[in-house]
Amino acid sequence: MDLQTPRPSWWSRNWKWVVPVIVVAGILLAAIPVAAIYLFAQFFLNTMKSSGGYQEALAAARGNPAVVQALGTPIKDGWFPSGDIQTSGSTGESDLAIPVSGPSGSGTLYVRATKSLGDWRLTMLVLQIKGSGERIDLLAGTAP
């Protein structure tokens, strides 16, 4: 009588390569939505930071003595500006809230701008200091 040992199951023969493949596939499947969200956020933030009076507002804040006194220098913009930008050809409007900070403090720069004939013009520019709530109108005393 010839006795043979039973053949090992498929799992017993293949687990050493199946487990790493499943782990790597799971990591890749989890990374795809995270990467898509990251790329969308980067595109959105770069678009916002390059238009709608954003750069003009930062330049005005950095050059304002009251803002420099309140925040110190250098004044940096934060990671997550919020607001709305709508453009149509050479016209548009933007309404933004830009987090800003310096070595002496931080706050939010509120910006309203209009685009006419291709040029952005700041119509409202106010810095609200975090903590004290003090508001500095950067356009006060300027000609319309």
Image (cartoon, rainbow, N blue to C red):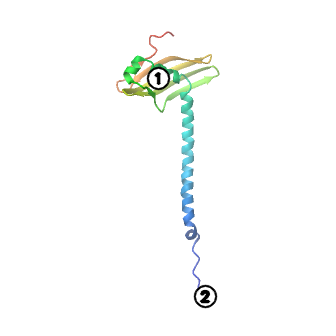
Q: Residue furthest right?
A: 89
**Would you identify the image quadrant in which residue 138 lies?**
top left
- SS class of the residue under badge 1? strand
- Badge 2 crowding class, 10 Å Cα cut-off, few under 14, some 14 to 19, many 20 or more, is few
Q: Which residue is mark 1?
A: 110
The answer to whether 63 appears left or right of 25 in the picture is left
Q: Give coordinates of residue 108: x percent, y percent.
A: 43, 26
**Would you identify the image quadrant in which residue 89 lies?**
top right
Q: Give coordinates of residue 66: x percent, y percent.
A: 39, 18
Q: Residue furthest front?
A: 74
Going by the numbered disc 2, the residue's amino acid type is Asp
At 41% from the left edge and 23% from the top edge, which residue is drawn?
Answer: 128
Tell me, for residue 2, which label it has, or none: 2
**Would you identify the image quadrant in which residue 135 lies?**
top left
Q: Would you say residue 134 is visible in this rendering?
A: no
- Badge 1 crowding class, 10 Å Cα cut-off, few under 14, some 14 to 19, many 20 or more, is many
Distance from disc 1 to disc 2, alpha carbons, whole Å, reads: 88 Å
Q: Give coordinates of residue 57: x percent, y percent.
A: 49, 21
- SS class of the residue under badge 2? loop
Mark 1 or mark 2: name the one nearer the start of the chain: 2
Q: Residue furthest bottom?
A: 1
Q: Would you say residue 139 is visible in this rendering?
A: yes
In-front residue for pair 100/103: 103
Q: Residue furthest left?
A: 132
Q: Quadrant of the N terminus?
A: bottom right
At 58% from the left edge and 86% from the top edge, which residue is drawn?
Answer: 3
At 55% from the left edge and 66% from the top edge, which residue is drawn?
Answer: 15
Q: How many marks?
A: 2
Q: Are marks 1 and 2 in contact (CB under 8 Å)?
A: no
Going by the numbered disc 1, the residue's amino acid type is Tyr
Q: Give coordinates of residue 121: x percent, y percent.
A: 54, 17
